[in-house]
Amino acid sequence: MATVQLPRSIRIHRTSKKTVFPSQIASEHESLIMVKKLFATSISCITYLRGLFPESSYGERHLDDLSLKILREDKKCPGSLHIIKWIQGCFDALEKRYLHMAVLTLYTNPKEPEKVTEIYQFKFKYTKEGATMDFDSSNMSFESVTNSEDIKKASVLMIRKLYILMQNLGPLPNDVILTMTLHYYNAVTPNDYQPPGFKEGVNSHFLLFEGEPVNLQVGMVSTGFHSMKVKVTTEAARVSDLENNPFQESDTTEIAHQGLDCDEEEEECSSDIQRMNFMCSQQSSERSRKKRKVSEPVKVFIPDRK
């Protein structure tokens, strides 16, 4: 049974005291800070607008004219501490340049975690080839050299799009469960590596949706040292006005059978590529594939949404 999701939205502010992102990105260290903050801000957007935690679990920060809610440690809400620990684990893997993808997954049946409701993919790359950003409009794409201001604009656009998307998704079930899996670059990640708060995970061959899944591209930000790409997957029926949705990929048939975003062109550290399929209930075939090293939380999280 679905519950009514309380309407939450971003607010407009004309002044900004506590900013989100660094004003300049001229080194790998500054880039790492930027990507960490962008990732944490994105997770905060998702948890806030999906109504997973109370207002007391969020602090306020500003991004241009946007007033954002950022997760903070709230001893009255143990769940916020849970998610923050996951984020810190991702930070550790990012610092070591091991993390390929973080996948935040929402499901309802603890006995069937492969049957999912929503999936949020954050894919990372590490490069020193110079700052570039992908623009995509009307099926035409190009690259341009960017500077710190361009990176900030791309980040603002990504957060705005994420907020818009969250506000156009149907309400979550009352009994939703959260987990996060971390996928690594096998060629550089030690076999025994586990970030704080995580343990060795099972690399599942497939995930299931009750209805037809649809991939929604939120965007990508590249600093010249790191890039972060965000994609949301949910059931098509849960997205309002899907036909006119600007986030939807063009080929719905491909969307239904597309896997976690481990594209070959994105894999820099190994020639052995693993592809994982999101499979509809009608499709059960599996292909043999090399498994990517995966971590999962020591404990999944069940929000108190009553």
Image: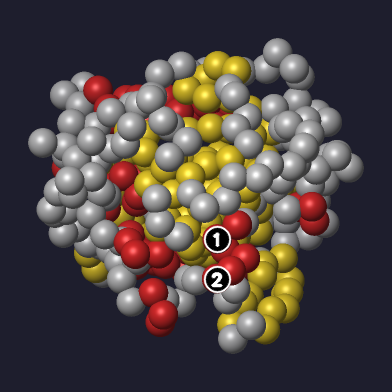
- 130 or 267, which lies in front? 267
Residue under circle 2?
252
Q: Residue at x 58, y 69 (%)?
A: 253
Residue type at mark 2: give it: Thr
Q: CA distance from mark 2 to mark 1?
A: 6 Å
Residue in the foreground of this view, choosing between 210 and 119: 210
Corner quadrant of residue 47: top left
The residue lying at 25 percent from left, 49 percent from top is 172
Q: Residue at x 46, y 16 (%)?
A: 298
- The scheme the figure's colours follow is secondary structure
Residues at circles 2 and 1 in contact by the CB criterion of under 8 Å: yes
Foreground pick, 134 / 72: 134
Secondary element type, mark 1: helix
Percent from the top left, x then y, of residue 91?
Answer: 55, 32
Q: Is residue 2 left or right of residue 279?
A: left
Residue 182 vs residue 298: left or right?
right
Q: Is residue 151 above or below residue 251?
A: above
* Above or below, 87 relative to 166: above
Give how far across and how far down residue 68 sits, in percent.
30, 54
Q: Does residue 231 sit above or below 79 in this rendering?
A: below
Q: Is residue 60 visible?
A: no
Residue ranking furthest to the right: 271
Tell me the amino acid under the disc marked 1: Ala
| Residue 220 position by quadrant | bottom right
Tell me the SS state at disc 2: helix
Q: Position of residue 295 (x, y in %)?
A: 58, 25
- Total number of numbered discs in the rendering: 2
Left or right of 289 on screen, residue 194: left
Graded by Cα atoms within 10 Å as few (under 14), some (14 to 19) or many (20 or more), the crowding at tag 1 reads many
Q: Say whether residue 247 is visible.
A: yes
Q: Residue at x 52, y 42 (%)?
A: 207
Q: Which residue is mark 1?
A: 256
